[in-house]
Image: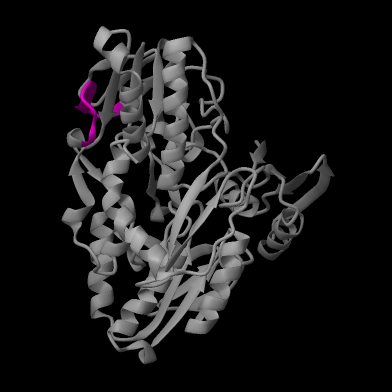
């Protein structure tokens, strides 16, 4: 059954939000949603770029009080 | 107060010694007791493996007897934990003994897990164990030229290792006088050559200057050993003659088997370092699921915080400070130059140009580490 997982990468300079997401993807099952929390503005661009390149699905991106919430679905 | 530390690596050892010094009176009076359970009677200086892989040190320099590093008053047993009974405040060990605790610290570390990628373990060289680092050195010593590919899995221990091994291999082959027969190809999982933006800004021009090619947004999918081709999740292929890997890591099997955290990473509070949902269970070093570097310095600074906090819990019944996410990493930029990166949850690093002075400080730290593990530095 598909799950929603939160990856709290706030304040993460190293390895950083995208690396945390890549690691999280490896632990997730196809169909799972992963929501990355990031205080790094660059993640709003980096994560969708990687998602598109690998072929996963971008569900949405929003920003609230300096935190970016980027939701993706593992597609394969 | 019975304090039980599971794991005798850097984090567990620094914490045990830190606590023993802070609680000297309490240990003597019997008000506190510190017990460490470890899987080994030896303590390895893991950052030394990088140097072992390029023939710069020998294995004996990596080890000390664990008991010799511990303050008097710490009870030490080589008897790894097999079962965590957190609801009962007990653990069970391999020998069948049960240890009860008031405060538990889990510092079991992480291990490389190349088996998660088809073909990686059989077809690549790496350096995260003594055995693999020696094997890698023997392989590079016999290598007479060709295409070396350095590839990186996620998450991995030591965030600087991919850059360092690349620069050090470059200089190794340069010293052997066969640089003209070599091609270097570096890969990295995200869209720049290192996760730290300022480190990437420094490292990419260094790669350009040294003729090291790089492909970013490259996540290892599989290795075709028969045809010597590395394939990425992103759909690209890369031929190699010698494949060097920084494999993805996992926490220890005992963590996952006991249901404490997926892939062996324990959900941990980023400031208090307690296991989520448990007030008397703390996690230090690689074992946490925190979004920070899996590095010795992380374990060291976490242990410093926990040492103060656990001692305060014994003395005044409450922790006194938060872990701020501090990490400090040396970055070897070849055989004789280095720089460093220091950062925390709030402040990104700003590495300077590499110098010989920082390299020699790192060389000195390789020896000073043993004072660090004893909690003296």
Q: Position of residue B284 (x, y in %)?
A: 44, 34
Look at the image and tell me whether residue B216 can be seen.
Answer: no
Q: Nearest the camera: B101 or B351?
A: B351
- Residue B74 magenta-highlighted: yes
Q: Nearest the camera: B298 or A26?
A: B298
Residue at the (32%, 35%) spot, across then down: B375
Drawn side of residue A23 relative to residue B257, left or right = right
Q: Which residues are magenta?
A: B69-81
Quarter placement of the C terminus of chain B: top left
Picture quadrant of residue A54? bottom right
Look at the image and tell me whether residue B205 can be seen.
Answer: yes
Picture quadrant of residue B20? top left
Query: Is A65 drawn above or below residue A19 in the view shown?
Result: above
Q: Nearest the camera: B58 or B38?
A: B58
Query: Is A56 drawn above or below residue B21 in the view shown?
Result: below
Residue at the (26%, 44%) spot, across then down: B370
Quarter placement of the N terminus of chain B: top left
Drawn side of residue B249 relative to residue A51, left or right = left
Q: Position of residue B173 (x, y in %)?
A: 32, 81
Residue found farthest to the bottom: B180
- Residue B247 magenta-highlighted: no
């Amino acid at each position: 059954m598909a799950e929603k997982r939160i990856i709290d990468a706030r304040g993460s300079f190293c390895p950083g939000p995208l690396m945390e997401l890549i690691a999280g993807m490896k632990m997730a099952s196809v169909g799972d949603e992963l929501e990355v929390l990031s205080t790094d503005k660059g993640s709003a661009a980096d994560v969708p770029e990687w998602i598109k390149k690998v072929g996963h699905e971008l569900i949405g991106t929003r920003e609230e009080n300096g935190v970016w919430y980027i939701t993706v679905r593992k597609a394969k | 107060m019975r304090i039980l530390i599971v794991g005798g690596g850097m984090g567990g050892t620094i914490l045990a010694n830190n606590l023993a010094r802070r609680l000297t009176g309490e240990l003597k009076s019997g008000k506190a007791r510190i017990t460490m359970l470890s899987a080994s009677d030896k303590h390895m200086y893991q950052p030394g493996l990088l140097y072992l892989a390029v023939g710069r040190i020998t294995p004996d320099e990596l080890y000390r007897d664990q008991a010799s590093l511990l303050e008097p008053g710490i009870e030490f047993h080589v008897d790894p934990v097999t079962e965590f009974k957190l609801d009962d405040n007990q653990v069970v060990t391999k020998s069948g003994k049960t240890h009860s605790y008031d405060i538990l610290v889990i510092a079991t570390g992480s291990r490389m897990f190349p088996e998660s990628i088809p073909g990686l373990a059989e077809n690549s060289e790496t350096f995260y164990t003594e055995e693999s680092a020696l094997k890698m050195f023997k392989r590079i010593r016999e290598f007479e030229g060709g295409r070396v590919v350095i590839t990186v899995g996620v998450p991995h221990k030591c965030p600087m290792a991919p850059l360092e091994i690349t620069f050090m291999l470059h200089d190794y082959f340069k010293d052997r006088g066969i640089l003209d027969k070599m091609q270097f190809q570096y890969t990295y999982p995200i869209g720049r050559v290192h996760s730290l933006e300022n480190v990437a800004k420094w490292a990419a021009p260094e790669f350009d200057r040294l003729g090291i090619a790089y492909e970013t947004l490259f996540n290892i999918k599989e290795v075709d050993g028969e045809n010597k081709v590395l394939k990425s999740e992103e759909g690209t292929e890369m031929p190699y003659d010698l494949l060097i890997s920084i494999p993805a890591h996992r926490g220890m099997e005992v963590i996952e088997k006991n249901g404490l955290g997926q892939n062996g990473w324990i959900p941990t509070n980023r400031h208090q370092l307690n296991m989520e949902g448990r007030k008397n269970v703390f996690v230090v070093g690689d074992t946490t699921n925190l979004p920070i570097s899996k590095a010795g310095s992380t374990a060291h600074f976490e242990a410093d915080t926990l040492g103060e906090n656990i001692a305060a819990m014994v003395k005044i019944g409450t922790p006194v400070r938060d872990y701020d996410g501090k990490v400090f990493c040396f970055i070897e930029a070849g055989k004789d130059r280095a720089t460093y990166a220091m950062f925390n949850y709030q402040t990104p690093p700003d590495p300077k140009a590499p110098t010989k002075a920082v390299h020699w400080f790192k060389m000195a730290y390789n020896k000073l580490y043993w004072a660090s593990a004893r909690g003296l530095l």
